[in-house]
Amino acid sequence: MSIDISQFHDVFFEESFEGLDAMESGLLNLEEGAADVEEINTIFRAAHSIKGGAGTFGFMAVSEFTHKMETLLDEMRNGQREVTPESTNVLLEAVDVLREMLTAVQQDQPTDDARIAVVCEKLVDMLGGDEAGDTVESQGETETAAEDGGEGPIGWKIDFRPHLHMLQTGNDPVRMIRELDSLGELSVTADDNNLPPFSDLEPEDSYLAWHMELRSDVAKEEIIEIFEWVDDDCDLTIEPLLGTATVAEVSAPAEDEPAAIVEADEPFVDVEELDEEADLIAEPAAEAELKAPAAKAEAKQKSASTPAAASIRVGTDKIDSLINMVGELVITQSMLSQVGENFTEEMLPQLIDGLAQLERNTREMQEGVMRIRMLPISFAFNRFPRLVHDLTSKNGKQVDLKLTGEQTELDKTVMEKIGDPLVHLVRNSLDHGLETPEVRAAAGKNETGTLNLNAYHQGGNIVIEIIDDGAGLNEEKILNKAVEKGLVAASDNLSPEKIHELIFMAGFSTADVVSDISGRGVGMDVVRKNIHSLGGSVEVSSEKGVGTKFTIRLPLTLAIMDGQSIRVAKENYILPLVSIVESLEVKGSEIKQVSGKGELYKLREDYVPVIRLYEVFGIEPQITDLEEGLLVVVEGDGQKVGLFIDDLLGQQQVVIKSLETNYRKVLGLSGATILGDGTVALILDVPGLISLYREPPSGNSVVKAVRAA
Amino acid sequence: MAKILAVDDSASMRQMVAFTLKGAGHTVTDAADGKQALDIAKTQSFDLVLTDINMPVMDGITLTKELRALPSYRFTPVLVLTTEAGGDKKSQGRAAGATGWLVKPFNPEQLLATVKKVLS
């Protein structure tokens, strides 16, 4: 029977990556305190599992590499080796290499053999060439084995006397005897000399012994192997059965027998024909060999073109509660259909009850399904101990990283997309925020700085905070830079909050020298943009000398959002509720016409540009006078604009259907949704609308695209 | 066909072992560590226990010892899954009362052959 074990590869990769994460965080913990045996054990176990799995699933390079790590960890675990920063660093590096190897294997890509070799050498150096010793030893063993298995006698004489307790290891002597029997012609004599009188007999003990003669040309090793599991639980002697007179008599017919069988089966076959037949048998085998590589190549191609579907691990409790809800939904449904079957007016309260129940079921189901996609934020936080370790060893700062609220859950997709902005903010704090130990000491602070990553739920949002107790934002420096870049005028009298906000403006960077850690040309504006694209926001608050706090707010999911229905002429659109600042009736006196910039509306101290949505979407307008309609002030990319609409309808949760997957990306629209009455409404993308307003494309492509749709 | 309890903290190994054994017609119950396995073993009987050695919470050696202390598992075959490097693991397993071992890495065919050996 051949079993395709490649179906378990996905699980193997998944658990291996989890194992690597566990190893990494374990190694980072090791460094902090004295060697903790339980911690080393955990790391060891992860390496051990990866090695075992890799071997089983045929990834030998991975298995061999992990074996070296395992050996090193085993020595640490047994106290034969001290845990030093050097060994920890080598192991961390090895974790990286292993992760790369596994990723490469998973994606069917070539591995970076040069890098593997370098780290492999470091591991071997650390092991002090013990590995080489191992190999020599095992070679020696093989040689002896070969010697023993040389010139064979005609068989073996085996004396097998199980110890009293052998049955209690779950080993049945019958199994050994049966296996011996399968190797050749076996004669067995039971020896009951040790059998005690019946009254003393313990039924759980084994008293019998067996003297056996096996006539076969098998090597002694094969027999030893049969008794491998019990060689400590029995007395076993295996001696060659020599060709003595009596034995020879018995063995002679045995040798003749096979020949006789052949004759009987095929009385007329001569040697030549036999050869031919052998050829025939060989052919299909050769063919199969030829086919095999082709099939393999095909399989490879297939796997390269269709990337594996991303998977998610879901706790069974979540699934169970979902099944529960489906059960309730079914009950509601059957109740409603009963009401519907012979409906009379008296049943109206029942119908209303049923519909209310249906609404509750639907809401619970929706929440339940959303929860399936939810993962604890620790998945995103877990990479930071390593990042902090690596960066602080480069810049000589001392930082204590605190992670809180790691169990706060958010949508998997949001998690994947928030990773990079988070890394950027953390790097930023480590580079610009926290001071060197000397500076801190001089300022009377603890030499070790604190960086706190915190997460919690608030309403329908998740809030992530990045708090450091560093120097705080340097307002003077920021202001000078902003003036120098022409972002603000020197005469502007800005509040500290406004100055802090400047760091999010495009093209802003205070780093005097672009450092290795942050400021590779990617500014905070990109961070804000990425967060906005997730429907979130980021704010900064800072106090000089005390620290800086970045607060990120994100929706829990991207699949559903709170929307505001609006009407433009005869069309309905949805505006994301988060982007709306306020809605107001326009006072004609506050409208200013600016040449080249269109209309501006004076909103208290600000002027906001007015975007007439019917123009953007090329709809036949019903009202064109601003005073007759409404102005919805929205914010996107840090800029406010007023959208001119006919009317505000209701607020509702909408399920977002992607335009990109069903049609194509359209600037100014983030998707579409189906309304309660079955009609489709487009969801407006505020930052997109703003950039459309700033640089209207020639021929107004949105209109065309939407019309085409 | 036999009732088998398969214990391994690695999900991929557990699935592979269970799939292989089920394919051969056995009934398989699995557990992710020794403690879980022991709890299961106390409420049901099995014809064979296959256990990994290195596991969190309770390792395979301890599990074997604990099983042997249960009257209904005194003679039940217990196979430990060990790695080639674990020479001392074999003797530890044996000292704990394991029937035998299967050396990792193994393929489904080797697994079935070994299982067949102990199930008479």
Image (cartoon, coloured by chain):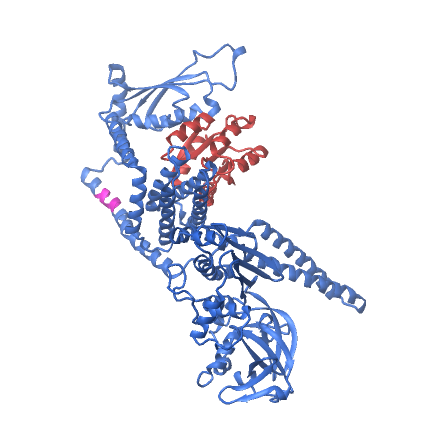
Which residue is nearer to you in this view: A481 or A64?
A: A481
Left-right relation of A606 to B97: right
Image vertical order of residue A58 relative to residue A208, above or below: below
**Residue B84 falls within the magenta-colored stretch:** no
User: Among all residues in the image, which is located at the extreme right?
Assistant: A346
* Chain B as rendered: colour: red
Residue A479, relative to residue A611: is it above or below?
above
Which one is nearer the viewer's eye here, A150 or A434?
A434
Q: Position of residue A231 (x, y in %)?
A: 38, 23
Q: Main secondary structure of the magenta part?
A: helix
Near-viewer residue (B119 or A572): A572
Q: Is residue A277 magenta?
A: yes
Answer whether residue A280 is visible to the viewer in this image. Answer: yes
State the image coordinates of residue A265 (x, y, percent, origin top left).
28, 35
Q: Residue furthest left?
A: A272
Q: Give above or below for A439 relative to A604.
A: above
Q: Quadrant of residue A173?
A: top left
Task: Answer whether residue A683 is visible to the viewer in this image.
Answer: no
Of residue A517 and residue A151, the one placed in the foreground of this image is: A517
The residue segment tinted magenta is A276-282
- x%, y% of residue A218? 29, 27
Identify the residue at horizontal 30%, vertical 53% (top origin).
A112
Which quadrant holds residue A188? top left
Relative to residue A517, is residue A655 drawn left or right?
A: right
Q: Quadrant of the N terminus of chain A?
A: top left
Q: Which chain is blue?
A: A
Q: Position of residue A627 (x, y in %)?
A: 64, 87
